[in-house]
Every structure is written in structure tokens, then in C-alpha cells.
Image (cartoon, rainbow, N blue to C red):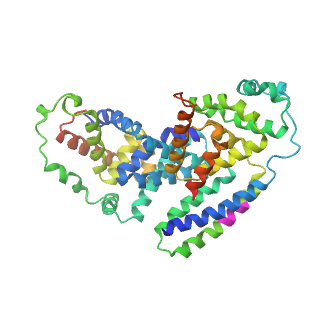
Amino acid sequence: MSDFLASVERRGFKQAVFAVHDDDSAYDILQDAMMRLAEKYSDRPAAELPLLFQRILQNAIRDYFRRSKVRSTWTTLLSSMGIGQEEDYDPLDTMEIDDVGSVPTSPADQLEQGQVMEQIEEAVKSLPARQREAFMLRYWEELDVSETAKVMGCSEGSVKTHCSRATHALAKILRSKGITL
Amino acid sequence: MARQIARLIAAGLLAAAASVASAQPSEKLKTPQTPWTRLSPEERRVLEPVAPEWDRMPGYQQERLKSAVRRYPSMQPIQKERFESRIRDWATMSPQQRKEARETFQGMRRLPPEKQHELRERWLERQSQDSGPQPRR
Amino acid sequence: MNEKDFADKLKPWLDRSAQQVGEMQATRLKAARLRAMDAWREPVRLFGLVTMSANTAQTLQYSVLQRALLFVPIAALVVFLALQSASETDLGELDAQLLTQELPPDAFLDQDFRSWLGKSHG
């Protein structure tokens, strides 16, 4: 259990930071998720832990939004109700992104790595909650579509939609900042 | 503020609870001894540093060490290293010293992480001053 | 570039961002893990639970007294469970944790260290 937690704590923490934009809250969320896992599922085989942990963590993040009055709440609600998706592209469409040819081929040419990292983190933070959740689970935690759907409590189709939108939004933002991966 | 007060009260009650709990005879009087030769090869390997004393140790201490050794496979490399280098000193402390060390350790863990961090840094800092520029243990 | 390719390229960046959490955060994360591990198997396990309840309680709009009262049943449960499990709990776990964390055991017998600890609690 301890090894498992050690192996996921940083990513879990970052996921929470991306979601709630605040280190302290993210830390509390992670602590909460770890406690719940350790208390309730200590008897589960190690192979089940990653999925359980993700489920608990994502629930903890959603609980946080439910409880708090932060501005993201409505975004979470809207996107989980499947409306307001047009919102996703609003800030992006206003950006000049067509000039792909002038984008430097290596990120290091243009920006310090730290700055690239910062831009990536900002881009991830700016995603609507459900899209970010889907993207993180599917591509960072490397769950498959059906596992992601289970964790998110939605259909596999929704997972694909969220992932696809998240990917396009991220690609767009990054390109607009002059970052190619 | 309210949260701090609530925590304080909780901490007080818990301290009471903990002291009641520790007053329990956790180290039972007549735990049977395990001769060195009856240990598994893995146990003997990890407990090698305390081999000379093993057969003279009371049963409860042996059990406790064996139980700690069961965690060994799941330790991180740095933890294994620490465990190996410290187990001998640990075993040669008096029961009272071990008890006090555990209490202090648990007391430290009840602090918020930042304070734990401060405390560790402070102690390590002072050690490095006391003993000159040596690597941290 | 399709979705998967893009994600594959982004992943190392995210991994690196997770690896690069500051020393302070790393310490906090480790402390969080240790607390969770307390909940996993030890007699002091309910400490973590109470900490959690304190957080939960904070979000409710209760008076100080009400919040304090909230802990009474929990504390009673702590006493009960601690008494019940003290004899059978695997104490080796605590020793293993003590022996494998950053500070050497000597630190916990050091008078200065103990007095600093006392002040930190105060």
C-alpha cells in the first residue's frame, strides 16, 4: 500500500492542482483520497488499487467543487450536464493560431523548458473539468476507455468525446503559445 | 481559529486516548523466544547485524523485530539502507529508550507536515554543525 | 497528428511536472502518505480520521462548541478501538517506520529535539 501511494502521490497531487488551481486544497484532496483508500480498501489486491485510487481521487475533486463556491463550479456542472460545450473553444478561437509554419521545431529554441512546462500546466488547468478529467485518466494515468468511463461515471462515448475535445483544445492553446511538442 | 480550537480539543482527547492505549501491556510478558536457527533465511539475512544478540533477546523484542523485518521487502532502497544501518543500535537500546523514541517519533508525526519538516531540518542542521561536514546519516 | 500521438508527447511533460514538485511539497506528500498508512493498520490510525473530520467540519457552518462536540463520539471511538487493538496490533510496523524515515533513532532521544518538539506542539 505504501509503495503504491508513493508511486501515485505526485501525479495525484498534480491532478488535483490542475483541477482546483491551489496547492493547499490539492494537498487536502490528496490526503483525503489516500486516507479513504487506506481505510476502506486495504484488503484489496494491489492490481485493483490504481483504478480504486483514481475513482476516489476524482470523487474527492468533485466533492471539493461541490462544497466550495469557487468559480469553476458552474463549469463543472455545465460540462457534466453536457451543455455549454461551445464554451471550450471561445477563448481559443480569438487567438491567432494559423501561422504554424513559423512555430519553432524545438521547444527549447523558443522557450526555456520551465516556461514550456508552465504553459502546458496552464493549458491543462484551463480545460473544462470533465475534459481534463477524461484526458488525465485516459492519457496520463493510461486507463482504457471503459475504465475511464467507470471512474467518471459516464458512457464510453462521452469519454471519447471529452478526450477528443480536450486534446484539440490543448493542441490549440499550445500552438497559440508557439509550442510544438 | 475555530478549526484550531477544535483540533486542539481533539488532540487533547487523542493524547489521552493514546496514553491509555500505550499503558496496555503491548509487550506481553511471556512471548516465546525464537532461536536464531529457526528464523527463515530472509529473516536471518536482514537481521544479520543483531545476530550475536538474538538468542539473548526477550521473545517480545524478537517478535517486534521480526514483524518490522516483514516490511523489509516493500521498503524503498533508501529505506532498506537506513533500516540495515540502524537496526543494531536500535536493538541494543534499552526497552525504556525504545519506548521513549517511539513516543517522540509519534509525537513528531502528529505535527503538521511543515512543522515536521522544520524540526527535521533543524536537527539535521545542528548535527552537521556538531560533527563537522559529514554526510547525513 | 492524431489524438494518441499528441497525448503521448504531452505525457512526458506531465510526468516531469509531477517529478518537479518542490522539496516542501514532496515532504508534505510523504507526510500525507504516512498519515494514510497510519489509517491502514495502526492503533493511532484514527488520528488521520480525526484530522479528516476536522477538515470536513470546517466546511459546515457550525459554532466552535458544536464543532468541538463533534469530536466527542469520535474520541470515544478512538479510545475504544485503541484499547481493543493495542494488544493485537502489529507494533513492528511502527518500528519499521521509525527506523526507515529520515532521522536516525538517536534524534528521538535527543533532549533538544524533544524540547523543540514540545514547543512545536505548543
User: How many numbered circles are shown?
Assistant: 0
Camera sees residue C5: yes
In the displayed structure, does residue A133 sit left or right of residue B63? left
- Residue B116 in the image, given as x and y percentages of width and height: 54, 48
Camera sees residue C39: no
Q: In the image, what residue occupies the spot 60% across and 54% down?
A: C118
Q: Which of A59 and A9 is in front in this view?
A: A9
- Which quarter of the figure has residue C47? bottom right
Quadrant occupied by the C terminus of chain C: bottom right
In the displayed structure, does residue C117 sit left or right of residue C61? right
- Which quarter of the figure has residue B131? top right
Q: In the image, what residue occupies the spot 56% across and 41% down?
A: B123
Q: Does the magenta stretch include residue C77?
A: yes
Quadrant occupied by the N terminus of chain C: top left
In the displayed structure, does residue B18 sit left or right of residue C6? right
Q: Which of B121 and C43 is in front in this view?
A: B121
Which range of residues does the magenta coloring cover? Answer: C75-80
Q: Is residue C70 above or below residue A28?
A: below
- Residue C112 in the image, given as x and y percentages of width and height: 61, 46
From the image, give the main secondary structure of the stretch colored magenta. Answer: helix
Q: In the image, what residue occupies the spot 60% across and 46% down?
A: C113
Q: Does the magenta stretch include residue A133?
A: no
- Residue A24 in the image, given as x and y percentages of width and height: 42, 54
Q: Which of A129 and B7 is in front in this view?
A: B7
In the displayed structure, does residue C44 sit left or right of residue A166? right
Q: In this view, does A56 lie above or below B53?
A: below
- Residue C103 in the image, given as x and y percentages of width and height: 59, 38
Q: Which of B129 and C13 is in front in this view?
A: B129
